[in-house]
Image (cartoon, rainbow, N blue to C red):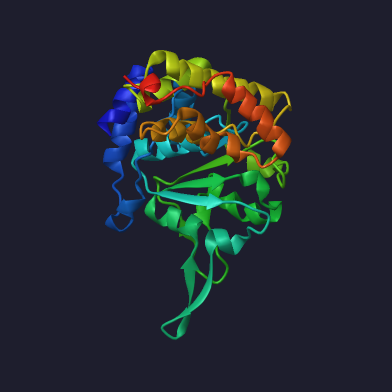
């Protein structure tokens, strides 16, 4: 946790906010049964303004909706916030078949009686977790409508046939949504009104370099700058419609650099982490050509690391 606080202070995040987060963590403990759900993320989010907006909202019992294109760090921000607040995380991936029972729970027969097998939203409410609604705009509106009382000032889950479940005071919900994915739809106004919305901007060169340097402190500056340039080149092509966003993968880029330390040629590592994320032959050729302008075939691990 100290490492995360240092990371936030390096970005200039308000000390007042950090003090309030510390008070929050001290006020709300974590049940031993869900300690394993408090997960340290592999990557911490970078972006002072976004972090301050998100932290302020969560401190005052607001729910967040994170919107933006792929590779803008929505899931990384979710993981960073949950770990910062020290809360168990419940990830709910939305899709066209998501219904109320998959969110709240369903009847089950146990000990000769019908009982409620709680879903992730109910468990999140009980243990004071952070519920992450991933791709919330892929679910049918009638499925998420059951969350209206959960997400507004009532902060309850009313399940027919069972007692009303009040939300633990530490419970928060964070939704994420991408633009233009197949199967997505516009969210209805009633649902959106229950969130504060943060629109995440595209990654910048400074942000990408910061992330790569954090992961690879022994990485050579010139080499990391080329990987930054590669990501920005692909990002521009994706936004201009020349390629899809499949290869716009920060995790894939970081993984490619990491496995290059084994002695694998960096261009081969990038092929696995970036190029092969596309399965269209024409698009793959464009991505491979873009890689070749930044990552020479002659590079070895010695060209990447001190």
Q: x%, y% of residue 228?
A: 50, 20
Camera sees residue 16: no
Rendering quarter of residue 274? top right
Q: Residue furthest top?
A: 222
Front in this rendered view, residue 230 or 201? 230
**Relative to 94, residue 22 above or below:** above
Point out residue 61 in the picture as x, y percentages from the top left corner. Answer: 46, 39
Q: Residue at x 62, y 29 (%)?
A: 288
Q: Quadrant of the N terminus?
A: top left
Q: Look at the picture and state if 122 lies above or below 49.
A: below
> Which residue lies most toward the front here?
298
Q: In which quarter of the view is residue 261 placed?
A: top left
Quadrant for the C terminus, please: top left
Count up the numbered dots: 0
Q: Nearer the viewer, residue 86 or 41?
A: 41
Q: Position of residue 32 (x, y in %)?
A: 27, 56
- The one of 305 and 109 positioned closer to us in this rendering: 305
- Do we see residue 287 in this rendering? yes
Residue lying at 50% horizontally and 38% vertically, measured from the top left: 75
Front residue (pair 173, 300): 300
Give coordinates of residue 40: x percent, y percent. Answer: 34, 40
**Residue at (30%, 49%) from the top-left corner?**
30
Q: Is residue 197 left or right of residue 22?
A: right
**238 relative position to 5: left or right:** right
Q: Is residue 159 above or below residue 94?
A: below
- In this rendering, the answer to whether 237 lies above or below 194 is above
């Amino acid at each position: 946790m100290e490492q995360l606080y240092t990371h936030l202070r390096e970005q200039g995040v308000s000390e007042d906010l950090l003090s309030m987060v510390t008070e929050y963590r001290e006020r709300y403990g974590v049940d031993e049964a869900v300690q394993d759900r408090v997960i340290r993320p592999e990557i911490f989010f970078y972006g002072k303004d976004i972090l301050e907006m998100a932290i302020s909202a969560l401190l005052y019992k607001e729910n967040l909706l994170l919107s933006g294109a792929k590779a803008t760090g929505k899931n990384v921000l979710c993981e960073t916030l949950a770990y910062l607040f020290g809360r168990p995380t419940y990830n709910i991936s939305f899709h066209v078949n998501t219904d109320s029972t998959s969110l709240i729970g369903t009847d089950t027969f146990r000990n000769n009686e019908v009982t409620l097998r709680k879903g992730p939203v109910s468990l999140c409410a009980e243990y004071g977790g952070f519920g992450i609604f991933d791709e919330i705009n892929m679910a049918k509106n009638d499925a998420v409508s059951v969350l209206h009382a959960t997400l507004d000032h009532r902060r309850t889950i009313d399940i027919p046939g069972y007692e009303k479940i009040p939300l633990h005071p530490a419970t928060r919900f964070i939704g994420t949504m991408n633009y233009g994915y197949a199967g997505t739809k516009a969210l209805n106004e009633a649902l959106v009104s229950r969130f504060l919305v943060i629109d995440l901007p595209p990654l910048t060169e400074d942000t990408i370099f910061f992330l790569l340097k954090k992961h690879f402190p022994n990485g050579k500056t010139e080499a990391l700058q080329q990987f930054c340039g590669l990501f920005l080149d692909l990002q521009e092509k994706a936004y201009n419609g020349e390629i899809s966003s499949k290869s716009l993968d920060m995790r894939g880029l970081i993984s490619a650099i990491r496995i290059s330390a084994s002695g694998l040629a960096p261009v081969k590592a990038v092929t696995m982490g970036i190029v092969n994320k596309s399965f269209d032959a024409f698009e793959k050729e464009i991505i491979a050509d873009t890689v070749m302008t930044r990552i020479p075939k002659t590079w070895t691990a010695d060209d990447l690391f001190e």
